Image (tube, rainbow, N blue to C red):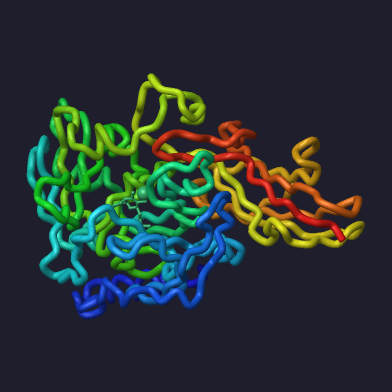
């Protein structure tokens, strides 16, 4: 990320060139030929998925569904650095009906509802009329890692790659709301994008935030990711960034902001994306009668990225372990490794802090004392003192899966 200013200048110029750079992207690729597959090591299978390179602006991705696209970041990408390259940033949409081409000269972001003045902002207004802010943040689908839930639950069978970290550039949502002038009595702010349901009686995708959250000065409207304009599949030209919160709130192709003085009753806010109101949102399979609440923030997680289950590790000599962690809704305080199935833990060294909402690299050396099978475990504790659970989170919708991750290795 050197030369950030140069990158942002270049991005700005390109964004203002209009649709030229985005014109006519083919969103529906040729049917995937499963020439290359990846083994996600899903207990009980099916374990393999095709790899695709057929999507506009995207490189090698795991194909979970063709249309609307669900493209997963291959796990080895997380071993290469804390910022997920744009061409491998995961993709998820609810409805297939979204534009493949956007004329940025015609594009407008509307701010309306319980405000003094309705706004219709062009991309130029956003790029040049408001203070610019930048921040690293992990976008994680609430369904990330769902495929590892046991018993299995319906929904996108994501492995651990429906998460990505980027350095976002944009403007504060607060500044945009202030310009419209929020009236007293405002309760929530609802966000919608250019995508539409494929059938008319299905609910348009929208999400809302409480008014104080929307005005916290951190929630932003991004036009850049990792020093380039947003990729189309990731929400070009504007995307809401809600640092520390689940990606379902990060509305893509954002073109409508509505300040509400009544609670939002739309499907995606009151019915979709809900979890048990229990610690860690977990319940025992089969249990019923619990209260459901909306998914909200992220929780701390950590992964070993350079060693996989089944790998051989030399016995009696130091080996290197490394990976990534994130604190959820705050920074990473520590990441600890266990090489004896969780009986004892050793601290790891944390890499550079790129911002509390982003990935943090960790690394350490360890020595396996004896031949045979060993279980490595990795545990993140965040700056609020919250650690990963040592049991697997489970709920019927398969959201917010979390546990201390294990790798079973063989010392030889
Ligand atoms: N407009 C719009 N925004 C959306 C969605 C959507 O369907 N439409 N899906 C949400 C969900 S559930 C996820 S996980 C993220 C995925 O963002 P990405 O494709 O940029 O990775 O977008 C969120 N924002
Ligand atoms: Mo999601």
| In front of the other: 51 or 2 | 51
129 left or right of 382? left
Would you place residue 27 above or below residue 209 in this image? Answer: below
Residue 344 coordinates in the image, percent (x, y): 80, 37
86 vs 390, left or right, is left
Is 99 situated above or below 53?
above
Quarter of the image that includes the C terminus? bottom right
Which residue is drawn at the image coordinates 35% and 26% (left, top)? 292
Q: What residue is rendered at 45% in x and 54% in y? A: 162
Residue 136, visible in the rendered structure = no
**Residue at image point 22% right, 73% down:** 16
Q: Quadrant of residue 78?
A: bottom right
- Residue 35 visible in the current orientation: yes
Q: Using the image, determine if residue 27 lies above or below residue 114.
A: below
Seen from the viewer's position, the closer of residues 319 and 354 is 319
Depth check, front residue: 395 or 381 = 395
- Please give the name of the residue rendered at 18% of the width and 36% of the height, measured from the top-left corner: 266
Q: Quadrant of residue 381?
A: top right
Q: What is the x, y in percent for residue 187?
A: 20, 29
Splitting the image into 4 quarters, where does residue 67 fall? bottom left
């Amino acid at each position: 990320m050197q030369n950030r200013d140069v990158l942002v200048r270049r991005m700005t110029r390109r964004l203002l060139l209009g649709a030229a750079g985005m014109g006519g992207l083919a969103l529906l690729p040729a049917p995937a030929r499963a020439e290359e597959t990846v083994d996600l090591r899903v207990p009980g299978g099916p374990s393999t998925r095709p790899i695709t390179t057929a999507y506009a602006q995207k490189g090698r991705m795991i194909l979970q569904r063709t249309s609307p696209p669900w493209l997963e970041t291959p796990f080895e990408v997380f071993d290469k650095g804390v910022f997920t390259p744009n061409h491998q940033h995961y993709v998820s949409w609810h409805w297939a009906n979204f534009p493949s081409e956007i004329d940025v000269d015609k594009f407008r972001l509307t701010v309306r509802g319980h405000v003094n003045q309705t706004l219709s902002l062009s991309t130029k207004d956003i790029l040049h009329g408001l203070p610019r802010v930048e921040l690293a943040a992990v976008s994680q689908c609430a369904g990330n890692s769902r495929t590892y839930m046991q018993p299995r639950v319906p929904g996108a069978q994501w492995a651990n790659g429906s998460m990505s970290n980027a350095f976002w550039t944009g403007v504060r949502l607060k500044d945009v709301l202030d310009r419209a002038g929020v009236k007293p009595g405002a309760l929530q702010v609802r966000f919608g994008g250019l995508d539409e349901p494929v059938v008319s009686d299905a609910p348009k995708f929208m999400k809302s935030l409480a008014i104080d959250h929307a005005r916290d000065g951190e929630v932003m409207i991004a036009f850049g990711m990792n020093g380039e304009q947003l990729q189309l599949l990731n929400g070009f030209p504007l995307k809401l960034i809600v640092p520390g919160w689940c990606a379902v709130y990060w509305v893509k192709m954002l073109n409508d902001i509505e300040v509400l003085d009544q609670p939002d009753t739309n499907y995606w806010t009151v019915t979709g994306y809900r979890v048990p109101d229990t610690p860690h949102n977990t319940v025992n399979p089969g249990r019923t009668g619990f209260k459901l609440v909306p998914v909200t923030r992220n929780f701390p997680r950590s992964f070993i990225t350079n060693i996989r289950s089944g790998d051989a590790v030399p016995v009696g000599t130091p080996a290197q372990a490394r990976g990534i962690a994130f604190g959820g809704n705050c920074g990473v305080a520590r990441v600890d490794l266990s090489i004896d199935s969780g009986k004892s833990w050793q601290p790891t060294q944390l890499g550079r802090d790129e911002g509390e909402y982003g990935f943090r690299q960790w690394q350490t050396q360890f020595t396996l004392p004896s031949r045979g099978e060993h279980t490595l475990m990795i545990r993140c504790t965040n700056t609020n003192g919250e650690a990963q659970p040592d049991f697997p989170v489970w709920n019927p919708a398969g959201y917010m899966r979390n546990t201390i991750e294990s790798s079973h290795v063989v010392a030889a």
